[in-house]
């Protein structure tokens, strides 16, 4: 049976390519990719505009419906559309989107009665999706796709907890990025070239994922994830807070690295 992925941007496309390599049939759904009719991603994944087109294209119900859109209202739209097509009756859905904990709980409350719905935000970036080394934080049943996609699966008892875990991880990543930017600025004050200092950090105890990806990680997405927590539970890493100018600090540090 075919697995359907709704949302084949950079992450969704990379995940789809990985699943195909591992022997799964995948159909993508994305109006941005298939705006004027059926299309393919750069990795050769077939893509249709919407679930209505997917229902017509599928000879039988799909094994799973993976929802990888960006916003909570888009998740609701996708699952509501799935309910309108008999081809998707009872098909298990996994929501891989990064949501606020309350939004994740609302999805389960609204749609959990009509199909199995798993909350399953992922971490690992495009490279992790492509290599099958994602970390999945899950509440609810997962299909066999996860065996091909993930190196680690963390299971939580309550809806909203996977979202909180993902966002706390990303909030810590944001705090680490801000601290790293400050370290590079202070190295500059000692006459140490920021690029040289970054290489020291990468090979020392201050290093890690953030140091390895400092020049190119998506600052705007990381900051968006940090802010998602605050309506429900203000998270602070002293002296780092929601009022911190993270974008300015990272831009300044990257400008130093470029010289």
Image (cartoon, rainbow, N blue to C red):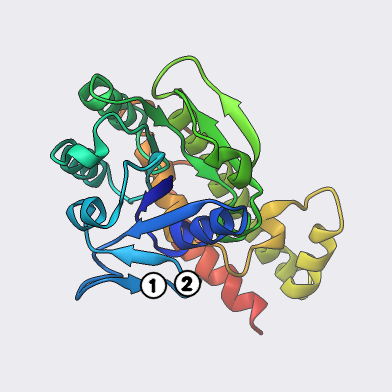
Report the front residue among 10 and 25.
25
Report the front residue among 203 and 115.
115
Query: Is residue 10 rendered to the left or right of residue 125?
Result: left
Outermost residue toward the bottom in this view: 259
Query: Is residue 147 rendered to the left or right of residue 15?
Result: right
Check disc 1 and report its element: helix, strand or loop. Answer: strand
Check disc 2 and report its element: helix, strand or loop. Answer: loop
- Give the class, few, some or many, for how many residues have Cα within 10 Å of label 1's Cα (few <14, many ≥20): some
Q: Residue at x 28, y 63 (%)?
A: 48
- At which x and y percent is residue 36? 19, 76
Residue for badge 1: 40
Report the front residue among 122 and 83.
83
Is disc 1 in contact with disc 2, using a CB cutoff of under 8 Å? yes
Q: Residue at x 57, y 77 (%)?
A: 255
Outermost residue toward the front in this view: 59
Q: Residue at x 17, y 35 (%)?
A: 83
Q: Quadrant of the C terminus?
A: bottom right
Q: How many marks?
A: 2
- Give the class, few, some or many, for how many residues have Cα within 10 Å of label 2's Cα (few <14, many ≥20): few
Q: Residue at x 84, y 48 (%)?
A: 205
- At which x and y percent is residue 177? 60, 54
Instruction: Relative to 12, say whether 146 is above or below.
Output: above
Residue for badge 2: 44
Give the spatial CA distance, label 1 vs label 2. Answer: 5 Å
- The image quarter containing residue 245 is bottom left
- At which x and y percent is residue 224? 38, 50
């Amino acid at each position: 049976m075919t697995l359907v992925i709704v949302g084949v941007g950079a992450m969704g496309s990379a995940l789809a390519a990985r699943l195909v390599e591992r022997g799964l049939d995948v159909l993508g759904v994305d109006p941005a990719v298939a705006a004027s009719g059926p299309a393919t991603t750069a990795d050769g994944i077939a893509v249709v505009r919407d679930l209505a087109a997917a229902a017509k294209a599928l000879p039988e119900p799909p094994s799973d419906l993976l929802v990888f859109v960006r916003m909570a209202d888009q998740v609701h739209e996708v699952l509501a559309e799935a309910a309108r097509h008999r081809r998707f009756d009872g098909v298990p859905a996994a929501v891989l989107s990064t949501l606020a904990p309350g939004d994740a709980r609302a999805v389960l409350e609204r749609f959990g009665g009509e199909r199995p719905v798993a909350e399953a935000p992922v971490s690992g970036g495009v490279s992790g999706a492509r290599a099958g080394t994602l970390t999945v934080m899950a509440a609810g049943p997962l299909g066999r796709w996860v065996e091909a996609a993930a190196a680690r699966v963390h299971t939580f008892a309550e809806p909203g907890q996977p979202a909180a875990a993902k966002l706390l991880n990303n909030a810590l990543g944001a705090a680490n990025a801000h601290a790293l930017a400050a370290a590079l600025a202070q190295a500059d004050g000692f006459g140490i070239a920021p690029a040289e200092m970054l290489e020291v950090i990468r090979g020392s105890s201050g290093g890690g994922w953030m140091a390895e990806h400092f020049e190119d990680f998506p600052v705007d997405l990381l900051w968006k994830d940090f802010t998602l927590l605050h309506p429900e539970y203000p998270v602070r890493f002293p002296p780092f807070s929601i009022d911190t100018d993270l974008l300015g600090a990272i831009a300044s540090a990257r400008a130093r690295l470029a010289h």
